[in-house]
Amino acid sequence: MSELTELTLKDALDGLAAGRFSSEELTRAHVEAVEAARELNAYVLETPERALEMAKASDGRRARGEAGRLDGAQLGIKDLFCTEGVRSTACSKILGNFTPTYESSVTANLWRDGAVMLGKLNMDEFAMGSSNETSAFGPVVNPWRIEGGNGKLTPGGSSGGSAAAVAAQLCLGATATDTGGSIRQPAAFTGTVGIKPTYGRCSRWGIVAFASSLDQAGPIARTVEDAAILLTSMAGHDPKDSTSLPVETPDFASFCGKSVKGLRVGIPKEYRVDGMPAEIEALWQQGINWLKDAGCEIVEVSLPHTKYALPAYYIVAPAEASSNLARYDGMRYGLRVDGANLTETYENTRAEGFGAEVKRRILIGTYVLSAGYYDAYYLKAQKVRRRIADDFDQAFEKVDALLTPTAPSAAFALGEKSDDPVAMYLNDIFTVTVNLAGLPGMSIPAGLDANGLPLGLQLIGKALDEGTLFSIGSAVEKAAAFKARPQKWW
């Protein structure tokens, strides 16, 4: 049965269509894999009975010739997505055992197309973190290890559970969200493919909010084509989300494998940062050479406001978070810690319910929005954000996409940076610009570092031009021929 979990999503769907196995068999194989991998802590809630029910229903639809685009495929769902009748906590104590009576639009689209839910995946609390160590359920352990070592590594964050589950073959694909790099950085750390689509491509309705002008859902998968198949189902206009774009969703998989000859790919000179490891610089150069060989024209471009992106992000995101998280007061749902009066009840509930990183960001956000500091911080950050978007607009007048590293290092040890928030925030240095400008970005596994750990390359595209990213991404994937898998130790 275990070889069934080794299939890509595309191969699994082809096998189901050809009748080589049933969705029920595929589901049982994945349920067993999930149960055997609890040491990784990727799932915070397993739903095997629901998965088998969904699989049997899928087999019935297939027998009647009514199979949907994803019929019978086993997926993991990040715990930020509300799932009707299934506990959804954003991995925070403050939501307690909150069980939504509604389904997020993204997951509703997946069930519409016949997907099977294996359970809810671990993540940083309220998606705030770069290492999956802020979760109320404890950290996720990366299935990868340093060659010859047995130290526990981070899978990245906030979508650490999604990336670890895909890398360890505990699902065929996973939903994830990206506010400042939370799809792409974990994908780079685990040798998987992750794409953050254009802001508004996927509905945010029913996804627990972190920073509403930055949050965007996307998939993590094993291949570029798998990510394309998942995104086609996840995306779509939703009148329930005022920021959802009223545009048609193309069949993204049709762009995979298309010729990239003649496309112009920009290399932003500002992404060559001081202290960047030589092997990441070398991998970036290797990526440039692969694209040249595939017929792309390489153009150096400038994004002069890049150096202000991280500070601007860490003003805008906490400001929005402090506003969004004001609703958690212990009055209507989730945790409630009583006090002598209303104010004390609020204080006790929030003190006990929120973790340290979430409290830190709420405090920063409240500070930058306060009367004396709004103009000095928040307003200035919004102006910088506009400049960053303008930089991309000018670059895209000359090029079709940009190529950069995804993260400034390979996966690091759990606990290594948790005492230094600034060192942790620097993990997002190559990814936050994309969120600030609302653009699509994709991470593709492209090689291993000296310790045998995966490294990723990032592609950044024009708004609503994910198709070009899938074409260039599949060219990088083909050239890199990345077949490495973590050795099973769990």
Image (cartoon, rainbow, N blue to C red):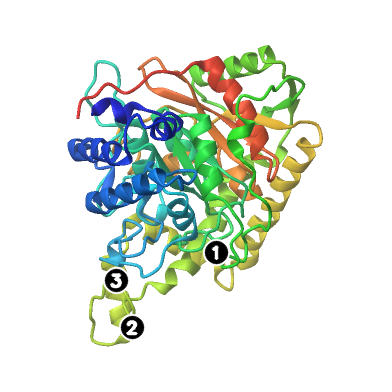
- The amino acid beneath tag 1 is Val
Question: Relative to 211, is 282 above or below?
Answer: above
| Badge 2 vs badge 1, beta-carbon distance below 8 Å | no
The residue at the point 49 percent across, 21 percent down is: 277
Q: Is residue 309 visible?
A: yes
Question: What amino acid type is highlighted by mark number 3?
Answer: Gly
Q: Callout 1 environment at 10 Å: few (<14), some (14 to 19), or many (20+)?
A: many
> Residue placed farthest to the bottom in the image?
341
| Closer to the eye: label 1 or 3 | 3
**Residue at mark 1:** 368
* Residue underneath mark 2: 343
Residue occupying image coordinates x 52% and y 49%: 234
Residue matched to label 3: 334
Q: Mark 3 vs mark 2: which is more N-terminal?
A: 3
Label 2, residues with CA under 10 Å away: few <14, some 14-19, many ≥20 = few
**Helix or strand or loop: what does disc 2 sit on?**
helix
Residue 326 drawn above or below residue 135: below
Residue at left 69%, top 15%? 292
Residue 206, numbered circle? none
